[in-house]
Amino acid sequence: MTQTHDTAVCIGRFQLLHNAQLALIRRALELAPKCVVVIGSAHQARSPKNPFTWQERADMVRLALAENERARTVFVPVRDFYDQERWVQAVRKEVVQAAGGDQARVVLVGHRKDPTSEYLNNFPAWELDDPGLQGDLHAKALRAALFATPSMPAALAAIAGQVPPSTVEFLRAWTQLPFFEQLRDGWQQLAAEHDRWADSPYPPVFVTVDALVRMGDHVLLIRRGRAPGRGLLALPGGFIEQRETVYQSALRELAEETGLRLLPSEMATALKEVRVFDHPDRSQRGRVITHAHYFAFGARMLPEIIGSDDAADAMWVPIAQLTSLEDQFHDDHFHMLDAFLGLT
């Protein structure tokens, strides 16, 4: 095939790599001498939805490619942002840099299979190559087989025909690592929670609150004590109760999870902003809309706190350390901090 482009681009989460995704990457390598694989949902904590680091996903792709294909493939990680405009800008920036400049002729290779493929419309400057249906494969179903099947040999056998042989071997070793059982437990708990709502006439929409408390150059965080996200960092928060306003709920959750109780007048004065975070994919639980309350106090002695209720621990964390902790945060909580504090 005559190559008519300088760079071909494939965008995906690759959680986990399956044959349809590999076919798209190989199609990209046919169209251009260089293929840029954009790995989404990068820098996140391990979870049933995002069990693999971006480096592990890049390794899965490398292992499935021939040596000459690997030499022409570049991997770039991009975080979710939960903000369409920022995400598109980040992808463009990474691709232009990898392609060697904005004059490169770029083709985007992807398949419009369902609403998750809408991202293909966000890059009108790039030619789109849609090779058509590559098989009815979904990484979510493959993750379900991996986490739900009690016998690991049986789980690997179940997905073997839908993923490259090298991915099966990768998973055989990966599932022996110590975090796998915790991921499997988390997946099973989420599955049980989803099953409780299976007979609802409408998909459930949950309303929650979160509190970002800043004192000088520190913010107040908790370490979650329950699934989903047990052991991960998060903002104090939880589900709103029926007779509460979102503000009342934020104060209650803050007190229950951290023991922070200041005068009502102090809290009211410190409240700088309330922002709604409603991205459809922000929570593993499903459709969860949260109201984040930003309380900013000046420099002062940090009050004593203690983790309780749903929080295993509570702590004051220097803002300067937050970016180094990005891969330890539950769901989109790092991105909420970023939205208020401008971390990235």
Image (cartoon, helix red, strand yellow):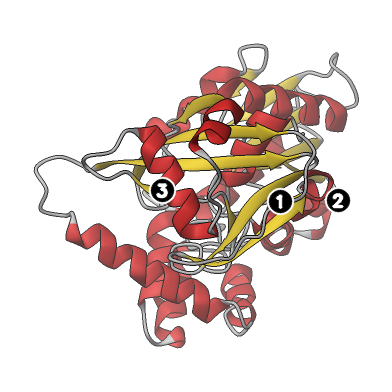
Q: Is label 3 in contact with label 2 (beta carbons under 8 Å)?
A: no
- Which labelled disc corresponds to residue 252? 3
Query: Which residue does the image show at 65% across and 38% down from the upper left?
Result: 337
Number of callouts: 3
The amino acid pointed to by label 1 is Glu
* Image quadrant in which you'd find residue 173: bottom right
Counting residues from the start of the chain, the first of labels 3 and 1 encountered is: 3
In the rendered view, would you say 285 is above or below 226?
Answer: above
Percent across and percent down for residue 159 are: 43, 70
Give the vertical position of 268 relative to 160 (above or below): above
Judging depth in this view, the residue of 4 and 326 nearest the camera is: 326
Residue 99 in percent (x, y) is at 84, 28
Residue in the picture at 59% in, 37% down: 336
Mark 2 neighbour class, 10 Å CA radius: few under 14, some 14 to 19, many 20 or more: few
- Which kind of residue does numbered mark 2 sit on? Ala
The residue that disc 2 covers is 71
The kind of residue tagged 3 is Arg
Q: Secondary structure at mark 2?
A: loop
Report if the CB atoms under discs 1 and 2 are less than 8 Å apart: no
Q: State which tag comes first along the sequence, 3 or 2.
A: 2
* C-alpha gap between disc 3 and disc 2: 55 Å
SS at mark 3 in the image: helix
- Residue 130 x/y as whole percent: 51, 28
Foreground tag (3 vs 1): 3
Comparing 231 with 124, the one in front is: 231
Mark 1 lies on residue: 326
| The quadrant where residue 38 appears | top right
Please tell me whether mark 3 or mark 2 is closer to you in this view. Answer: 3
Q: Is residue 80 visible?
A: no
